Image (tube, grey):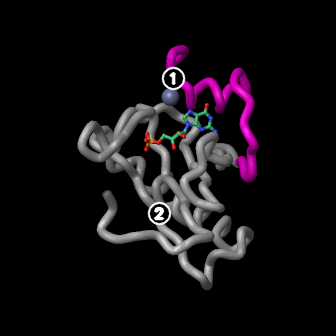
Amino acid sequence: MNDCIFCNIVNNDIPCEKLIENDSIIAFRDINPQAPTHILIIPKKHITTINDLKPDDSTLIGEMFLIAKQLAKIENINNSGFRMVFNCNKDGGQTVFHIHLHLLGGRKLSWPPG
Ligand code: 5GP
Ligand code: ZN
């Protein structure tokens, strides 16, 4: 998808601070961090929203969480705590329509979210 920011990041057409990459996933720092650690974990294949997930994507989604868990340890927020979030559509606050798992930590996060 040419007009998708995250597909362009996957293709290296838009630069990012990449932390982890494998055949199906990349993880990079959010350009507008909302916490000292704010990392996005995305599938390389374009999936528009969580509503578009198919049963075949279950391994991919599981791998995204495992990479986020690994990054929480690397960022040393595994013991202090962190949050993992998928926003979906307007009320969920989704602004980029290529699914991404947010990993947030390094400060006390409020609950419920605003
Ligand atoms: P959403 O609001 O869709 O859940 O999250 C989209 C996230 O992508 C936001 O936190 C935003 O700061 C981040 N973002 C948008 N464009 C770029 C970009 O070009 N590079 C990076 N690294 N992050 C981006
Ligand atoms: Zn995309």
Residue matched to label 1:
4
Task: Determine the residue positioned at 48% across, 67% down.
Answer: 83
Query: Which secondary structure, mark 1?
Result: loop
Q: Quadrant of residue 75?
A: bottom right
Position in image of residue 93 (x %, y %): 34, 43
Q: Is mark 2 within 8 Å of ligand 1?
A: no
Q: Residue furthest left?
A: 91
Q: 104 or 70: nearer the eye?
A: 104
Task: Determine the residue positioned at 62% across, 70% down.
Answer: 106
Q: Residues within 10 Å of mark 1 (few under 14, many from 20)?
A: some
Task: Determine the residue positioned at 42% across, 58% down.
Answer: 85
Q: Is mark 1 within 8 Å of ligand 2?
A: yes
Report the Cα–Cα distance between label 2 and label 1. Answer: 22 Å
Query: Which secondary structure, mark 2?
Result: strand
Residue 4 seen in the figure? yes
The magenta segment is: 1-21
Identity, as a three-letter code, of the amino acid under mark 1: Cys
Residue matched to label 2:
84
Side of 103 where 73 appears, left or right: right
